[in-house]
Amino acid sequence: MAYEHILAEKKGRVGLITLNRPKALNALCTPLIDELGAALDVFEADSEIGCIVLTGSEKAFAAGADIKEMSERDFIDVYSNDFITDDWEKVAKCRKPVIAAVAGYALGGGCEMAMMCDFIIAADNAKFGQPEITIGTIPGAGGTQRLTRAVGKAKAMEMCLTGRIMDAEEAERSGLVTRIVPLDNLLENALETADKIAKLSQPVVMMAKESVNKAFETTLAEGVMFERRAFHTTFALEDRKEGMSAFAEKRQPNFQNK
Ligand code: CAA
């Protein structure tokens, strides 16, 4: 499928989506969000795809929601149309794992979009921030919530109140990103990681993702019980049997996703 603002391609069992509005530093305009949602739907429905990587350019993952598109909108318009719409949340709702490979600016909606992914791998030039306050607004795609959960209140509050930008080192130190890799290796590293996940049992991967995400939505006791039931459920799968048999027989498992 051809898109105007993104590229979507299959790399073996990995679906790669590249934000592609270089002149606007991948600002997240509505047509881009629509295309991103469509590409995610295609990869979700494709049984050959086991993991998705979302990336941008070397200069910008995304420099935020499109300020030029937003500038003329008024309260009744954004309220009636529920902007930022649920379409933005498609990344967060995706059942297959989504890895953000972030180089350059991940600001405002760009930072929020990266945080909607399951984890972030950062290039050494990555910069994260919620600078909305400097243009007279606040984060609108989950930034105040997800950044706070990722880095804690002190840093999230400072960043949302001042617009201060965090470099890759600080982002790793604070738990916002899983690791930093040299810019030249970013995509290779993210694709390798995604490929590892895509080769595992897909229903088990989904259960692991659902269980980790539960930690953000519920009490510890409920989360632990959810995890235990999901763990029990893996025992209904042939893949669980295959994984443990392969370990005992000192061979690689051959998962069938069932
Ligand atoms: N929306 C629309 N256009 C944007 C944009 C954005 N968020 N960010 C950059 N651009 C455009 C610029 O307007 C410029 O276009 P023109 O050449 O047509 O003027 C082009 O991208 C290149 O940008 P700069 O010339 O500014 O590049 P720079 O290297 O000097 O600066 C930057 C880079 C620091 C990222 C700067 O572009 C910047 O501050 N961008 C805005 C960041 C921001 O405030 N993001 C939050 C947006 S609000 C939001 O996201 C709400 C939400 O929660 C969903």
Image: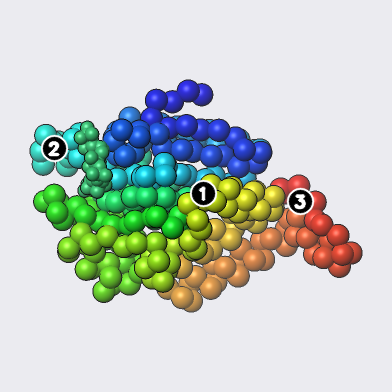
Query: What residue is drawn where x is 49% and y is 70%?
Result: 223
Residue bearing the label numbered 1: 184
In the image, taking residue 136 as reference, residue 157 lies left or right, namely right
Q: In the rendering, at what x and y percent does residue 111 appear?
A: 34, 53
Of helix, strand and loop, which one carries label 3? loop
Discs 3/1, front: 1
Q: Is residue 95 visible?
A: no
User: Which class describes the residues within 10 Å of circle 3: few (<14), some (14-19), or many (20+)?
Assistant: some
Query: What residue is drawn where x is 60% and y is 42%?
Result: 14
Query: How far, Cα to Cα, is label 2 from label 1?
Result: 35 Å
In the image, taking residue 21 as reference, residue 181 lies left or right, namely right
Amino acid marked by disc 2: Ser
Q: Earlier in the sequence, mark 2 or mark 1?
A: 2
Query: How far, Cα to Cα, is label 3 from label 1?
Result: 32 Å
Amino acid marked by disc 1: Asp
Query: What residue is drawn where x is 38% and y is 55%?
Result: 126
> Which quarter of the rendered image does ligand 1 occupy?
top left
Amino acid marked by disc 3: Phe
Q: In the rendering, at what x and y percent does residue 29 appear?
A: 29, 35
Q: Earlier in the sequence, mark 3 or mark 1?
A: 1
Residue bearing the label numbered 3: 255
